[in-house]
Amino acid sequence: MKQFVFGYGSLIERASRVRTTPEATEVHPIVIHGYQRGWYAHVNVPGLTTTFLGCRRSDGPESVNGIMYEVTAAQLARIDVREAGYLRAEISPEAIDVLSDVDLSEAIVYVYLSDIPAGQDLSPFFPSPEAPIVQSYVDICLNGCLEIEELFPAARDYGFAANFIRSTVGWNGYWVNDRIYPRRPFIHCPNAYRIDQLLQDHLPDPSLFNLIYFE
């Protein structure tokens, strides 16, 4: 039985993904149904006062797009370390739509979930002045989405990057533009202009883009 990991945030981008799993160069875009992505994950790491993307099961019609890639048992153990603070869970095959030519009949696909039950109020976990969204992290996620659109016509037709923005909850005005001095050692983002345009076009409240502040 093959094992796959579903990446719905920074793991979508190749450079970010291969830092943990150098062999993870072959990916497949998928959409999982019955899950909800949002800005509500907080990792207990000293010096990282940031809100990250989380994912949880949903009782509603929500879906999450991302990528999956095959892993060995040893690689899965390394990813467990990287994703400390999240809970690894198996995704039901019936919940998965694939946007590429891949056979999942003999596969297990795992997702790393936030420990927040479906239906629980998310607002206490959303970005705050103490733990804002940081643009360098947004850039990595959306740069990954743009990479996937270039590689997979079905993902491009689906509007992979735009749907990433639209299907993510918790966007708000606590959002720091840290591109010049990233809070984490993220790389320079050559797609910055395209990412800014996507955000302006697809945020649930376009005025949020004008509230991003520098630090």
Image (tube, helix red, strand yellow):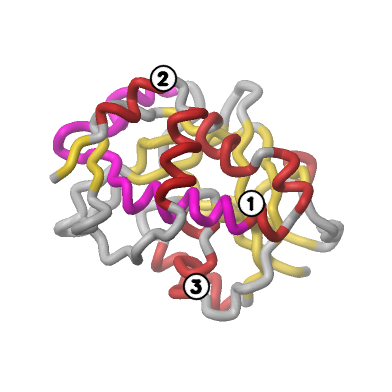
Secondary element type, mark 1: strand
Q: Which residue is mark 3?
A: 77
**Which amino acid does the dot numbered 3 rest on?**
Ala
Residue 83 image position (x, y, % from top left): 41, 60
Residue stretch rendered in magenta on the structure: 120-147
Q: Is residue 169 magenta?
A: no
Q: Which residue is mark 1?
A: 90
Chain-order first, disc 2 or disc 1: 1
As drawn, is 24 to the left or to the right of 47? right
Which quadrant is the N terminus positioned in? bottom right
Chain-order first, disc 1 or disc 3: 3
| Tag count | 3
Pick the residue in front: 192 or 172.
192
Above or below for 135 versus 119: below
**Which amino acid does the dot numbered 2 rest on?**
Asp
* Nearest to viewer (mark 3 / mark 2): 2
Residue 30 image position (x, y, % from top left): 70, 49
